[in-house]
Image: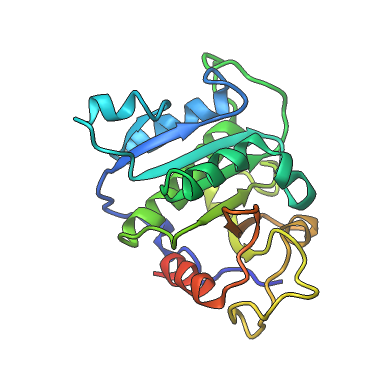
Amino acid sequence: MRTAAALLAVLQALAVQGIRIVQGNDDGWAELYARSFEDALRASGHDVYGIDTFGPQLWDGAAPELAVSGPNVGANLWLAVPFSGTVGAAAYAAHTARIPALAFSGADHGRLRWDTYPVPTVSEVYARLAANLTDAVVASGKPYLPDDVFLNVNFPDVDDACPDAASFKWVLSRINPGLFSPKDVEWCGDDRLPTEHHVHDQRGCYISVSIGDAKDKTTVNDVAKQQIVLNKLKM
């Protein structure tokens, strides 16, 4: 199992420069996962709004610097990816709007209202993890991701074995199998990244971070682009 011992070393405390972020969520603006994530992003100093035409009005015409989607209620892995609104929003941002984008998805505990109290641990943990990765990408500097690239991130469930953000490990992965694809970036002594499904089939607190091609929502089969993403997350 390729766990990321060095990957995302930036998950320690970071002084992150706040940026302009547009956030989308196909479960609706009032879903708790998304609202918790927004709170975490704002706590990191980012300026977050949910509509790409409204944000620039408040930013004096400036465009968003990063797009985030989710966390979705329910995983978005491999065969589900082409039909996912969460992934679709990130792919649209990266390909059409030319904004680097991150898509987040987590376990399905049913829809929760934005004003649910107390906030369930799972929502708080997902928000912290998603904000940590966002902060890592921002801290890596511009351009945040290569052109036409988005990250598809899937969190496992939060339970007694994985109770808090510190329990989780990040794993660089593929969206689809690479049976006939060129070699991937070398990571942990191997030149084939695990699929995100494989990551989620493992016992443990593993988060898959897949490098997606925004043109077709498959894996980026470009070692140079994969290496750029890996370098950013390793810091």
Residue 215, by quadrant, is: bottom right
Q: Is residue 1 above or below residue 93?
A: below
Residue 139 position, x and y percent, is 32, 57
Question: In this rendering, does residue 164 appear at all?
Answer: no
Residue 166 position, x and y percent, is 53, 52
Q: Is residue 221 left or right of residue 45?
A: right
> Looking at this view, is 159 or 221 the one in front?
221
Image quadrant occupied by the C terminus = bottom left
Q: Is residue 157 left or right of residue 117?
A: right
Residue 18 position, x and y percent, is 27, 43
Q: How is the image coloured?
A: rainbow
Residue located at (58% from left, 36% from top): 71
Question: In this rendering, does residue 40 appear at all?
Answer: yes
Q: Which residue is situated farthest in the left direction here?
A: 60
Q: Is residue 62 above or below residue 49?
A: below
> Looking at this view, is 166 or 190 the one in front?
190
> Looking at this view, is 204 or 140 the one in front?
140
Residue located at (56% from left, 46% from top): 91
Q: Is residue 158 above or below residue 187?
A: above
Residue 142 position, x and y percent, is 31, 59
Residue located at (39% from left, 45% from top): 66
Q: Is residue 68 above or below residue 174?
A: above
> Looking at this view, is 108 or 96 the one in front?
96
Residue located at (50% from left, 76% from top): 224
Image quadrant occupied by the N terminus = bottom right
Q: Is residue 22 left or right of residue 150?
A: left
Number of marks drawn: 0
Q: Is residue 234 left or right of residue 159?
A: left
Residue 67, by quadrant, is: top left
